[in-house]
Amino acid sequence: MAAVSINELPENILLELFMHVPARQLLRSCRLVCSLWRDVIDLVTLWKRKSLQDGFITRDWDQPVADWKIFYFLCSLRRNLLRNPCAEEDMRSWRIDSNGGDHWKVESLPGEHGTDFPDPKVKKYFVTSYGMCLKSQLVDLKAEGYWEELLDTFRPDIVVKDWFAARADCGCTYKIRVQLASADFIVLDSFEPPPVTIQQWSDAAWTEVSHTFSDYPPGVRHVLFQHGGRDTQFWAGWYGPRVTNSSVVVSHRTARSPAPAPP
């Protein structure tokens, strides 16, 4: 019996074979073999089926997707890009920008004059003092797997979240700043709401802060996340805002408007 070339196989069989090849290998190696393989690998059906296979969508998915290949890669990369967001490793991975008063400290929930966190999996928080305490992380998007074309052409939404709370017996001021920056650290977009001051004898409830960067300029390569605060009573110890469960996530949703043409 004569040998059959793989390229003589029906398209649906090739499609089935490619379903079992890692996505990056499909693009970096297989797609370059010949025009037939390129055309099959570019089929919407392949990436839609891979998205279903890997649990990124369900069979009854009805949301519009502009580019299924990009959708698949964004879903596969999706995770919290901040390390140690819930203080499980003390202050590890955080840069201390300001360490006023009695400095940053890690405590266990709910803490004195505190309340339980909405998510029971979160067990700890960072707490500030009577002098300004700020800490930050710098996320390198290329190092995290996001390539330049993906960032500049499709500009996926970048979703930032943080949680803060006061002690019931002490007032405090909380602040957050998040910046999108270029490779040489020029700020291209930012989120810096006015500081939030909580009065003494509050309910000590946890509050979520959320912001989505959409349709930002091309050239974003870094995300700078900074937060912290201080108490308003100037009491020795750790009576300032408590923060935990921070996150920076690149969404599967892409820009609604095309990237501006280069000058």
Image: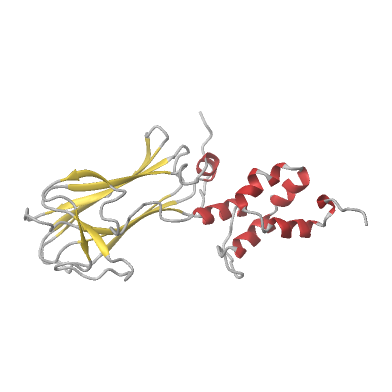
* Left or right for 147, reference 95: right
Visual colour scheme: secondary structure
Q: Position of residue 94 (x, y in %)?
A: 29, 48
Residue located 44% across and 56% down the image: 79
Does residue 146 sit above or below 199 in this rendering? above
Dividing the picture into quadrants, the one containing residue 50 is: bottom right
* Left or right for 133, reference 152: left
Q: Position of residue 60 (x, y in %)?
A: 60, 70
Dividing the picture into quadrants, the one containing residue 109 is: bottom left
Identify the image quadrant of the N terminus.
bottom right
Q: Which of the pair 133/58 is nearer the observer? A: 133
Figure label count? 0
Does residue 58 sit above or below 259 in this rendering? below
Res 191 seen here:
no
Q: Position of residue 55 (x, y in %)?
A: 56, 65
* Left or right for 220, reference 104: right
Residue located 58% across and 51% down the image: 70
Residue located 14% across and 68% down the image: 113
Q: Residue furthest top?
A: 263
Res 256 seen here:
yes
Dividing the picture into quadrants, the one containing residue 222 is: top left
Does residue 139 sit above or below 209 in this rendering? above
Q: Position of residue 238 (x, y in %)?
A: 13, 57
Q: Residue furthest right?
A: 1
